[in-house]
Image (cartoon, rainbow, N blue to C red):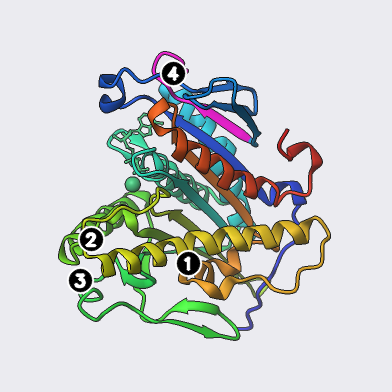
């Protein structure tokens, strides 16, 4: 049985990177504090006002902006359906064509990263919705291809990898990231669970989330400081043509982007802060380098190797891969500094696109 990996056709460059911003409703703390809204939106533009100096406002342009302050949002289901259509559908379609993809959520703790990626209760997020669609498509396929789906879930904390589907990996001191010519970077010994339904994926996600909380308690750490990464691997076997297509979808709920304040010792705080910022900073640097490349500048080096997160995402950032970033924030005046910093970080991703109209006004 001869098998061959197919890379597929070139994707239009405008489809390679999409950046979305989602604003969540005020929480109780913000309502109780009588917070003022400092965000306004017109189509793809989002403006943020400095609460201490209202003349000082900045406008950013993104591919998509979602306003979900209560009283302003459309019907909840309708709104989410459009979020999935904008951000998830393309990843689904490309995966079936054999492309890799990355979907990341970036933002301050409590701004809606997990709400957008995973969801809470009846409000399903992008990951379970994507899995539902994927299994639906597989079921309704007309041709003779055979599909296999594998699920992995891990956490990166202080540059250490913990398998969230294994009960033993935390005591083993984390898993090693290795590199080989064919696979690129991979996590040695990471569990890869074959799945045949979205319900099974949801169960595994629940299991992983429970382990994440236990690990955090055990290490006396805060899970908002770790990156959660889900890998969905889709293998399609076309026996007649003797072709195998494999695509990896990386779904990343990043650590909270706020500057780290820790209750631990000074040494712990420094180690933790540096390691977390290392992955977020390196991710930003990788994107900047890819942006320069897309703009035709000469780039000698893309610093994938500088952090665990970027090592693992190497095969799914840039090139023929689709990258989607959802930046989440609060519209409250008390979150001004963090929200502005989130918009600035997201802005670097937009520059990844070689499109003048997407540069900031
Ligand atoms: P993060 O993962 O960024 O720390 P969460 O996703 O846990 O934050 O969100 C914090 C709280 O805000 C949760 O209670 C969640 O239900 C609520 N929330 C976040 N985003 C939205 C949204 N777009 N619409 C309604 N509620 C939201
Ligand atoms: Mg979260």
> Where is 165 relative to 205, above or below?
below
The residue that disc 3 covers is 167
* Cα–Cα span, label 3 and label 2: 18 Å
Element under disc 3: loop
Image point 47% across, 24% down: which residue?
A: 51
The residue that disc 1 covers is 309
Q: Nearer the viewer, mark 3 or mark 2?
A: 2
Task: Find residue 75 and name its label.
Answer: 4
Image location of residue 186, percent across then percent down: 47, 77
Q: Which comes before the other along the chain, label 1 or label 4? A: 4
Q: Residues within 10 Å of mark 3 (few under 14, many from 20)?
A: few
The quarter of the displayed image where residue 298 is located: bottom right
From the viewer's side, name the closer residue of 150 and 103: 103
* Cα–Cα span, label 4 and label 3: 41 Å
From the viewer's side, name the closer residue of 331 and 182: 331
Q: Which comes before the other along the chain, label 4 or label 2? A: 4
Which region of the structure is painted magenta? 64-75
Residue at the top extreme?
71
Q: Decide if residue 135 is on the left or right side of residue 61.
A: left
Image point 70% across, 73% down: which residue?
A: 301
The residue that disc 2 covers is 221
């Amino acid at each position: 049985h001869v098998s061959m990996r197919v890379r597929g056709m070139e994707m239009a460059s405008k489809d390679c990177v999409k950046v979305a911003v989602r604003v969540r409703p005020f929480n109780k703390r913000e309502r109780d504090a009588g917070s003022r809204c400092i965000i306004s939106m017109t189509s793809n533009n989002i403006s943020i006002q400095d609460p201490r100096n209202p003349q000082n406002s900045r406008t950013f342009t993104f591919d998509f902006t979602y306003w979900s302050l209560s009283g302003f949002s459309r019907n909840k289901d309708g709104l989410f359906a459009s979020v999935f259509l904008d951000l998830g559908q393309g990843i689904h379609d490309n995966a079936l064509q054999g492309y890799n993809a990355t979907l990341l959520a970036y933002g301050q703790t409590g701004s809606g990263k997990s709400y957008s990626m995973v969801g809470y209760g009846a409000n399903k997020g992008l990951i379970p919705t994507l899995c539902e669609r994927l299994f639906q498509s597989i079921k309704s396929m007309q041709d003779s291809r055979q599909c296999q789906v594998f699920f992995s879930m891990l956490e990166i904390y202080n540059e250490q990898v913990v398998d969230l589907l294994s009960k033993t990996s935390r005591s083993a001191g984390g898993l090693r990231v290795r590199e080989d010519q064919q696979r690129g970077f991979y996590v040695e010994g990471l569990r890869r669970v074959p799945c045949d339904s979205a319900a099974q994926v949801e169960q595994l996600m629940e299991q992983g989330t429970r382990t994440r909380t236990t690990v955090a308690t055990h290490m006396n750490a805060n899970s908002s400081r770790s990156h959660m990464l889900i890998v969905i691997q889709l293998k399609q076997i076309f026996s007649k043509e003797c072709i195998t297509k494999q695509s990896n979808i990386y779904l990343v709920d990043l650590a909270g982007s706020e500057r780290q304040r820790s209750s631990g010792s000074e040494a712990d705080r420094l180690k933790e802060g540096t390691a977390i910022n290392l992955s977020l900073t390196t991710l930003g640097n990788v994107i900047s380098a890819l942006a320069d490349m897309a703009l035709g500048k000469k780039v000698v080096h893309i610093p994938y190797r500088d952090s665990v997160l970027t090592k693992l995402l190497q095969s799914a950032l840039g090139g023929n891969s689709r990258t989607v970033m959802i930046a989440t924030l609060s519209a409250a005046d008390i979150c001004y500094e963090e929200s502005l910093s989130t918009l600035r970080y997201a802005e670097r991703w937009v520059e990844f696109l070689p499109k003048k109209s997407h540069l900031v006004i």
